[in-house]
Each structure stands twice: as C-alpha cells, then as structure tokens.
Amino acid sequence: MGSNYENIHDLPKCSLYEANNNDDDDDACLSAMLLCCGPMIYTSVLKASIELNLFEIISKANPPCVSASDVASRLQTTQQHPQLPRRLDRMLCLLASHGLLVCSTRINEEGGSERVYELSLAGKYFVNDDNNGSVALFSTFMNHQKLMDAFNNFKEVLSDCDKGLYMKVHGMPVYQGIQSDPAWNHVFNRAMGDICTIEMKKILEKYKGFEGISLLVDVGGGIGQSLNMIISKYPSINGINFDLPQVIQQAPFYQGIEHVEGDMFNSVPKGDVILLKAILHNWSDENCLKVLSKCYKALPQHGKVIVVDFIMPQEIRSTKADKMITSFDNLMFLDGGVERTEKEFEKLCKCSGFSSFHVVCLAFSALGVMEFYK
C-alpha cells in the first residue's frame, strides 16, 4: 500500500522535527538527549585516553597538529591494525567536541582531507606536569570502581542523613576505603598533590594576605605541598604543617617547614595565621565549629584564619563555575561534607567567636579565599 501523502509538505508535523526554526527548543532538546548518554560515553573515552597517554602523545608532537594515524603509530599499549586510526579518530572527535582538543583539517599525502588535532588550553591540564599540575590522575581516581558503585546508588543520599553515601554502600568511610587499597591510595595522594599545585598557583597570583606573616600553620595540610608553595614565594615565613600521624609520616623534607602530628579536633599548633584549605567542606557545621574553636584558641589577638573552599552561589546559573561547585557539593555526599554559601561561612565565623569575616578573592570564579579575624 502507498502513502496517502503526495509529497513531504503534506506530512503531519511531529514536535521533534517541527520546522518552526525554534533554535531555543532545538538546543534544549539536544541538551536533554546529551545528558542521557553523553556523560557516560565522554567519561569512558576520557578514561581510555588517559590510560593510553593520548594527551602526552599529542603534547609532544612536532609539528603540534597530528592526525589520528600519527597518534596511532605512537601507541605502545595497543596492537596495530588497519582500523586503529579510524577508531582512534572517533575518540579524538569526541574530545575535540568537549574542548580538550582543537580540530582542523589538512590535505594528506594521498591528496585527501584528514582531521588533525592539537591540545586546547583545557586539554593541557591532562598532561602530566610536576610544575603546573594536572587533572589526569584526579579523573583516574574518580573513575575507580568503588566510587562508581557508590554513585550508582546515589538516591540513598536522601534516605539516611547520619551516614555518607560511601559508608552506606561499602560499610566504611570513604577515606578508610581509599587507605585500604594501596594502589588507589597512591593515585589519590598524587591526584590531590596535582590539584593542590593548580589551585595554589592561582591563589598565589590573586591573594596577597600571606605577606608579613612570621609563623603560618597549615591545618590538615597533607604532606605540606601547599605550605611549601607559599613559603617558596614568601621565604621569610616559617611554616608548621599539621596533620594526622599516618599523613605526616609520608611528608618529605621542605626547607622552612616543621611537620607536626596531631588531631585538629583536639588541638591546633599556635601560629600568627592558620590556613584551612579544603578542610571545612569535609565536615558538618558542628564539626567545623569544633575545628574553628581550636584555631581561635591557637591564634594571638587580631590573628586570622585563612579559609579556602568553594563558595556556593545563592542563585545557580548554567556556568562552568556553578557546574563545578554543585558537582563538588554532590561529591561531598560520599562522606557527609557540604559546600557552603558566603552567608553560611560567615555564620560559622561568627559562631566560633571570630570578630570579622571577609571574602578576599575568588580563584577560577569558584574557589573562595576568606579571612576570619580574631
């Protein structure tokens, strides 16, 4: 049987394909469909790209623009076969569509057109770089199967406020889970070190509040990387890096830094200024007040605590900064933490006895540097 419609103009209109030139609706529909499958596929391709060292290969190319065939010929972990360049090109196209590569075309030796790629500014953050930091290992850490198992049960965050999501799924706190897996723990420590480098470079560009400090105490300072970067810029500062014994045992020697073991819920070393970087967002308001009260006691009159944490906007927009902050806020469900608004930080400041609160600057339009004055 034939159709009752003589030409395409007689076809009934379908809302999905309605020729109404409604660009906003088209964009909204594409956004909705992309959210259904895009994150999983993109994350998988990104994970594979890091494992295959694709960003490293492209970063070392000379000239900088390389084809999929060029990249394929330099892969050492994959068996060469005729379909490899084509398959690899499909992955590189996806990375380019997400802004990690810049794609252009050139005429190849056979006279045909081929795509070529180079790293974008964002893509350079996936290249291992001890001096400037990298996000590659953080991506590897986030893709660990135990975290994936927790995220796949995300609705559980609404059912029990007394336990973190990781605890509900695996029966232990997330940091205990990390420490129980030596390989994962190694990736975590290196990833946090790389993120620290990226964040501190930007903070030291924008924040001048370390000038004139004699003794700076970094509470929960890990192995001392942040403090070392600060003292490298301000060598007149003496530093105390304060953390749990199992962390301090891994800390290397840094000129001008004394590593001190302890528990911030019990006491904090005395200093002119105390740094709390990425600490308060790990804890409930009650526990934050306990830590801040210990800091208050350790400071001289007019001393200050420098708090570095993401600041949650009151009104959420579809910006990269807001997507980053809200993503980390939901990540904090793993172990009962939370990202806070400026007003919530101010309330913590005043409730712990400090006299004044000030947001000094923002790094990456998201990471707040705040001062709590005694």
Image (tube, helix red, strand yellow):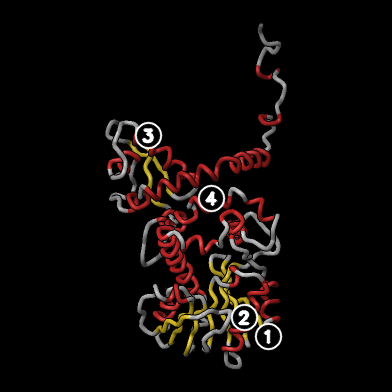
- Above or below 269: residue 201: above
Label 2–label 1 contact, CB within 8 A: yes
The reply to whether residue 175 is in sight is yes
Query: Which dot, 3 or 4, sits closer to the camera?
Result: 4
Q: Sequence-wise, which precedes: disc 4 or disc 1?
A: 4
Q: Which mark is residue 361?
A: none
Residue at the disc numbered 4 = 148
Q: Determine crowd level at label 1: few under 14, some 14-19, many 20+ residues with C-alpha closer than 10 A.
A: some
Q: Which residue is mark 3?
A: 86
User: Residue farthest to the top?
Assistant: 1
Q: Position of residue 188 (x, y in %)?
A: 45, 62
Left or right: where does residue 61 sit relative to residue 311? left
Measuring 45% from the left and 76% from the top, which residue is drawn there? 245
Identity of the residue furthest to the front in this view: 171
Which circle's residue, 1 or 3, is located before the other in the chain? 3
Please tell me which residue lies in front, 269 or 146: 146
Circle 1 sits in a helix, a strand or a loop, which is it? loop
Q: Nearer the viewer, residue 94 or 262?
A: 262
Crowd band around label 3 with a 10 angstrom C-alpha radius: few (<14), some (14–19), many (20+): few
Query: Which mark is nearer the camera, 2 or 4?
Result: 4
Measured Cα–Cα span from mark 2 to mark 4 = 33 Å
Badge 4 marks a residue whose secondary structure is helix
Q: Of the numbered discs in the image, which one, if any, rests on residue 353? A: 1
